[in-house]
Image (cartoon, rainbow, N blue to C red):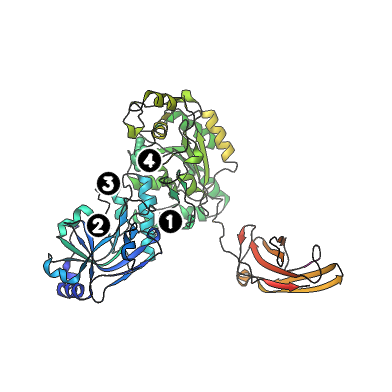
Amino acid sequence: QSQELSQAHIDYHVALQALQEHGTRMVCTGKMHTDRVCRFDYLCYCSEAEEFVFFHSNSSVMLPNLGSRRFQPALLDLSSVEDHNTQYFNFLELPAAALKFMPKPVFVPDVTLILNRFNPDNLMHVFHDDLIPAFYTMKQYSDLDDEARLVFMEGWSEGPHFDLYRLLSSKQPLLKEQLKNFGKLMCFTKSYVGLSKMTTWYQYGFVQPQGPKANMLVSGNEIRQFARALMEKMNITTNVEKEKDGGSAEDEKERKDDYVVVFSRSTTRLILNEAELIMALAQEFQMRVVTVSLEEQPFPSIVQVISGASVLVSMHGAQLITSLFLPRGAALVELFPFAVNPEQYTPYKTLATLPGMDLHYVSWRNTKEENTITHPDRPWEQGGIAHLEKEEQERILESRDVPRHLCCRNPEWLFRIYQDTLVDIPSFLEALKEGLKTKPSVKKSKPASTVHPGRVRQPQCQTSVQTTNEAKLTVSWQIPWNLKYLKVREVKYEVWIQEQGENTYMPYILPQQNYTFSENIKPFTTYLVWVRCIFNKNLLGPFADVLMCRT
Ligand code: UDP
């Protein structure tokens, strides 16, 4: 049922003729294979060869036309993970005339997004690498709408989270495996290939140890809008209405509704004293505590619970990606097993602390070796070390800190991250108190304003010479144009003064719109002056054009 492509919607002969006459057309964005997404008319896929095919004709277009640089290393990354050599996309080329000798193509009428899922078995990867990038790639190209068809080319089967991928559009996504059911040659009438990497915040350590991406381009706002869209698709109602109402009676009622969520893992990386932890949390926060786990509930009901929580507590692990559904002002408490440094494994910390995400983040780490349960005899991928040389096993067992390492098979890392933990309650509560100096409250937290100042207007300078070694420099300007429409708590101005030819400058912060400088101002000297506006201490505006001021 799902694999019907309803050929009725397109006139087969018109399509075939267009392909034969015009061939394939490709126009891409992006300068490098790592930031490229390409749009195609009539990109074809040969299921026998497992290759995409570009048909050349008199009117085909290939932009960028890289020549053989197209293979150095590839046209683009098919997943959102940067420059991963198993995720490259390219096509073969043929003259359109070759179509005469090929199997009759089947045309796909839907606008199609072609991509690789990176690791569809792991919930964190599902969201970070696939769902959010696909969601925003679809926002970027308006014909990738609710009717768009997604095609996953990584070659995996549906996986445990396929229902989540189904939420991206109303059409059933296709797997590489299924493409051959459509015949030997399939041609996508309109398609986009690749994913925007704009929303990803974490790199997994293929070339340097894992950590936040160097140049993050996403804010909490986009993550929250994605979360809201997904919740709507899952028919989840939020408590936002409740939050909006003021009044102390409401406050009282709402406090009773506050709760802590413990996200438990049931197979690996366990919390061994979960009941004790739950009691401690209930006492500490004076709230009820509920537990969720991926093994026990359908995903939407977990999201429903988390979207109303004040605190989310869990062991480090992929389930913590659900913190993107926490309400503003909530707290995320991440637990780490013995010998694992929380500062080195921060996908969830980075998410929680994105500007505008408005979550509190606290980590706790087991520092007591007697409270850890190791599993040296498990298979290596679950952290077993029995296959290693005796000395190496001993070194690992003696180490109290996993040294920095690359992805993905470091045995010491796997050994430590798959330990079970008896959470030491006093040190846990201490970390909570230390980390949550302000108590989490869903209610209090309003989204911080992120409107930046415009340029200051009509900047001017006037100068005068007092004596042979004294001079004055008066700088004045008008408020930025957008300020008169805004309520801003604090407006300040920053002025930089640089003597021409010098490579240092003096910065000044001023509350008013003009100022006369006399200290360090010399007669018969040219000064370069920059002025900008600052809202609420840290929202910087752009500098106005530089002023040249001669005393
Ligand atoms: N998982 C789970 N319960 C468990 C262990 C794992 O639900 O007890 C899920 C986990 O959320 C992830 C997948 O199984 O989606 C793979 O888990 P793994 O421990 O390999 O990865 P990690 O959580 O460390 O990213």
Q: Which sits earlier in the primary sequence, circle 3 or circle 4?
A: 3
Q: Nearer the viewer, residue 118 or 227?
A: 118
Q: Hey, what amino acid is under mark 4? A: Cys
Q: Is residue 359 above or below residue 316?
A: below
Crowding around mark 4 (Cα neighbors within 10 Å: few <14, some 14 to 19, many 20+) is few
Q: Of marks 4 and 1, which one's residue comes earlier in the chain?
A: 1
Task: Classify residue 79 as left or right of residue 354.
Answer: left
| Alpha carbons under labels 3 and 2: distance apart | 14 Å
Query: Residue 172 got which mark?
Result: 2
* Residue type of the residue flagged with mark 1: Thr
Residue at 70% x, 66% y: name it: 501
Q: Is residue 478 visible?
A: no
Discs 3, 2 touching: Cβ within 8 Å: no
The numbered dot on residue 199 is 1
Can residue 472 be seen here? The reply is yes
Kind of residue indicated by mark 3: Gly
| Kind of residue indicated by mark 2 | Gln
* Marker disc for residue 408: 4
Calculate the distance from the C-alpha at mark 2 to the C-alpha at mark 1: 24 Å
Q: Nearer the viewer, mark 1 or mark 3?
A: 1
In front of the other: label 2 or label 1? 1
Vertical placement of 110 versus 18: above or below? above
Q: Which mark is residue 159?
A: 3
Q: Nearer the viewer, mark 3 or mark 2?
A: 3
Within 10 Å of disc 2 (Cα), the crowding (few <14, some 14-19, many 20+) is many
